[in-house]
Image (cartoon, helix red, strand yellow):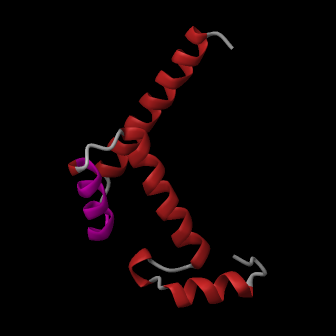
Amino acid sequence: MSREVAAVRLARLHIRALQQTEFSMTKSTSPLRQRMIDDMKLRNMSALTQAAYIRAVKNLSQFFGRSPDQLTYRIGNARVIQRGHYL
């Protein structure tokens, strides 16, 4: 793959991440998610990193069926073993 093609793909990913981040900030968000977004902005994280972190927390929350603020190590460990996934 040429450098130009790679640069175009990276630019498209960056634009998509910016659009997703802007969308997630315009809809109503929980205080916990807003705090996470604010903390990432304070740390000058890129839009791609912010989108990836928010997506990871959302997926983790869906996997365990609980809000991120209700997750503990004990709940996570029991749920993973119950589903047959061992750490």
Q: Does 36 appear in magenta?
A: yes
Residue drawn at (44%, 38%), measured in percent from left and top? 17
- Quadrant of res 85: bottom right
- Quadrant of res 23: top left
What residue range appears in magenta?
A: 29-41
| Vertical placement of residue 1 versus 73, above or below | above
Q: In the image, residue 4 lies at what x, y percent?
A: 56, 9
| Vertical placement of residue 9 versus 58, above or below | above
Q: Quadrant of the N terminus?
A: top right
Apparent side of residue 81 relative to residue 64 in the rendered image (left or right): right
Q: In the image, residue 86 lies at what x, y percent?
A: 74, 78
Residue drawn at (30%, 60%), measured in percent from left and top? 28
Apparent side of residue 28 relative to residue 53 in the rendered image (left or right): left
Apparent side of residue 17 relative to residue 42 in the rendered image (left or right): right
Residue most extreme to the left: 42
Residue most extreme to the front: 87
Q: In the image, residue 53 lies at what x, y percent?
A: 44, 54
Nearer-the-camera pick, 60 or 20: 60
| Vertical placement of residue 67 versus 36, above or below | below
Q: Quadrant of the C terminus?
A: bottom right
Q: In the image, residue 64 lies at what x, y percent?
A: 58, 78
Q: Does 66 appear in magenta?
A: no
Residue drawn at (38%, 36%), measured in percent from left and top? 18
Nearer-the-camera pick, 19 or 75: 75
Residue drawn at (27%, 61%), measured in percent from left and top? 34
| Vertical placement of residue 8 versus 22, above or below | above
Magenta stretch prevailing secondary structure: helix
